Amino acid sequence: MPPNDIATYDIDLNGQGLRIGVVMSRFNPKIGEGLLSACLDELRALGVSPERIRVATVPGALEIPLVLQRLAQSGKFDALVALGAVVRGETYHFELVSNEAGAGITRVTLDHGLPVANGVLTTNNDDQALVRMREKGCDCARAAVEMANLQKTLP
């Protein structure tokens, strides 16, 4: 934390009035649905009205950035959330999907100046993802709300 004599931006987790878009990969469905459930529960707890939340599903993690891009281009959202799981297999495909999905998500954020909370888990096995899904879904909801509000206050 900065010293008391340095001005800081407040953390604002009030989701009232915000419009949030969520894109979830259907690959590894149990994990994706767990992430989504936790994220939606937390968005509602933060005051985001259910009618101001839109959810799109896509086949896999590599398809997430394209839909995020379209949602960002629409101008209808204050923040976006990407949810899914890439679980390590026996081939290099894990690294390819993990890296490219992450890079695409970051690109949408920077190209559009719109916060995107990255909740695409990259784990060694299903058990690791199952243990992390609830907290990560909640974390993404909080990050989306906080960043949407921060964006509104920045010069």
Image: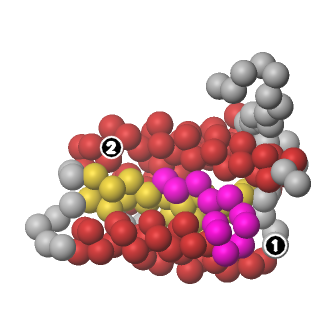
Q: In the picture shown, does residue 69 fall above or below 140? A: below
The residue beneath circle 2 is: 130
Badge nearest the viewer, 1 or 2: 1
The amino acid type of the residue labelled 2 equals Leu
Where disc 2 sits, the SS reads helix
Query: Which mark identifies residue 75?
Result: 1
Q: Residue 148 in the image: x percent, y percent?
A: 76, 51
Residue type, label 1: Gly
Number of numbered discs present?
Answer: 2
Q: CA distance from mark 1 to mark 2?
A: 33 Å
Q: Quick one: quadrant of the C terminus?
A: bottom right
Tell whether 64 sits left or right of 49.
left
**Quadrant location of residue 6?**
top right
Q: Residue at x 21, y 51 (%)?
A: 125
Q: Earlier in the sequence, mark 1 or mark 2?
A: 1
Front one among 135 and 34? 135
Q: Residue at the spot x=33%, y=56% of the render?
A: 122
